[in-house]
Amino acid sequence: MKVVVSRSGGIAGLRVTWDVQVDEQPDAAAWMQFLDTLPWDEAEGTAPEPDRYVYRIRCAPHEVVLAEPQVQGAWKDLVDRVRAVSER
């Protein structure tokens, strides 16, 4: 299973993408449990704000698009985890 986080927007309008192959992680079971707890069906899209980031998070069959202020709690934890693994 692959998790992909893309961040776009901001002042420069650049897109950055981080991803992690969950099955290859030493703590794959913990990743799967964490992914199962995310409120995929409850995420509500909001209109993008000028000079703010927009995050697209994909983990088949799920996909959410979140404005920067919505990336908090479990969503922030997910973005931080994927980014940390991807940047190793």
Image: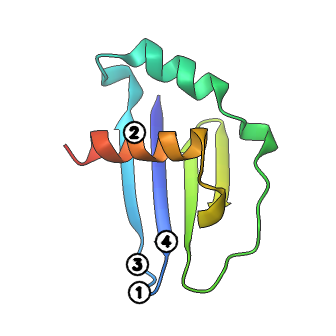
Q: Amino acid at mark 1?
A: Ala
Callout 2: SS: helix
Task: Kindly identify which residue carries mark 4.
Answer: 8
C-alpha separation, residue under disc 3 versus residue under disc 1: 6 Å
Foreground pick, 63 / 29: 29
Callout 1: SS: loop
Q: Amino acid at mark 3?
A: Leu
- The answer to which of marks 3 and 2 sits earlier in the sequence is 3
- The answer to which of marks 4 and 3 sits earlier in the sequence is 4
Mark whose residue sits in front, 4 or 2: 2
- The answer to which of marks 4 and 2 sits earlier in the sequence is 4
C-alpha separation, residue under disc 4 versus residue under disc 3: 6 Å
- Residue 81's label in the rendered image is 2
* Label 4: few (<14), some (14–19) or many (≥20) C-alpha neighbours in 10 Å: some
C-alpha separation, residue under disc 3 versus residue under disc 2: 21 Å
- Measured as percent of width and height from the top left, residue 38 is found at 65, 32
Task: Kindly identify which residue carries mark 3.
Answer: 14
Q: Are marks 3 and 1 in contact (CB under 8 Å)?
A: yes
C-alpha separation, residue under disc 4 versus residue under disc 2: 18 Å
In the displayed structure, 44 sits above or below 77; it is below
| Residue 73 appears in the rendering | yes
Foreground pick, 84 / 8: 84
- Residue 12's label in the rendered image is 1
* Label 2: few (<14), some (14–19) or many (≥20) C-alpha neighbours in 10 Å: some
| Residue at horizontal 46 percent and vertical 83 percent from the top | 13
Q: Looking at the image, which residue sits at the far left?
A: 88
Question: Is 47 on the left-hand or right-hand side of 25?
Answer: right
| Residue at horizontal 54 percent and vertical 84 percent from the top | 51
| Residue at horizontal 41 percent and vertical 45 percent from the top | 80
| Residue 67 appears in the rendering | no
C-alpha separation, residue under disc 1 versus residue under disc 4: 9 Å
